[in-house]
Image (cartoon, rainbow, N blue to C red):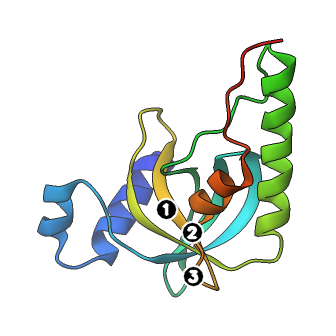
């Protein structure tokens, strides 16, 4: 079974009632997760713990925030993208996180979700407050 299909199946089994989750096409969580690596300023690879002894590795695209692309042709946007990745890497270092409101992303192989730090702060809001989401005119 492909990892993405397995992830959805396990998440659907893990929450109750299953029918209400299917109707919303969104799993409320929260689900504890270990951060494995930061991919870019708004995408993280995590190991989501579904229940004791059962976890799934996947990519989470943070909801409500958008950072520039790391490989942008625009130097200014690329600099902001790398700064956003560094910000997120430092923010998540040694943190326990929870993911919630998990839903399919428009790109295969990842999911949209909120990520919450152990102190209750929303990671998307922290990135937005950092100012690293701007998309300035290309230089």
Q: Residue at x 19, y 57 (%)?
A: 24
The residue that disc 1 covers is 114
- 14 left or right, relative to 68: left
Which residue does the numbered mark 2 point to in the structure image?
A: 122
The image position of residue 82, as x and y in percent, is: 85, 38
Q: Residues within 10 Å of mark 1 (few under 14, many from 20)?
A: many
Q: Could you tell me how far apart the alpha carbons at marks 1 and 2 are, in whole angstroms?
A: 7 Å
* Rendered-image quadrant of the C terminus: top right
Task: Give percent across and percent down for residue 94.
Answer: 82, 77
**Which residue, given by chain and number where applicable, does mark 3 sit on?**
120
x, y percentage for residue 52? Answer: 52, 88
Q: Tell me, yes or no, whether the two marked residues, 1 and 2, touch with CB atoms within 8 Å.
A: yes
Viewed as shown, does residue 40 lie left or right of 18? Answer: right
Q: Earlier in the sequence, mark 3 or mark 1?
A: 1
Say which mark, if any, is on residue 42.
none
Q: Quadrant of residue 41?
A: top right
Q: Residue at x 68, y 35 (%)?
A: 134
Q: Residue at x 76, y 13 (%)?
A: 138
């Amino acid at each position: 079974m492909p990892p993405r299909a397995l992830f959805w199946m396990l998440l659907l089994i893990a929450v109750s009632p299953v029918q209400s989750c299917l109707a919303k096409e969104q799993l409320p969580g929260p689900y504890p997760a270990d951060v494995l690596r930061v991919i870019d300023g708004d995408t993280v690879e995590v190991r989501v713990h579904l229940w004791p002894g059962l976890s799934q590795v996947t990519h989470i695209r943070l909801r409500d925030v958008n950072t520039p692309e790391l490989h942008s042709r625009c130097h200014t946007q690329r600099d902001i993208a790398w700064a956003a990745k560094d910000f997120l890497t430092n923010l998540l270092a040694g943190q326990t996180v929870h993911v919630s409101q998990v839903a399919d992303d428009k790109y295969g192989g990842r999911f949209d979700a909120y990520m919450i730090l152990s102190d209750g702060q929303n990671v998307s809001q922290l990135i937005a407050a950092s100012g690293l989401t701007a998309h300035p005119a290309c230089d």
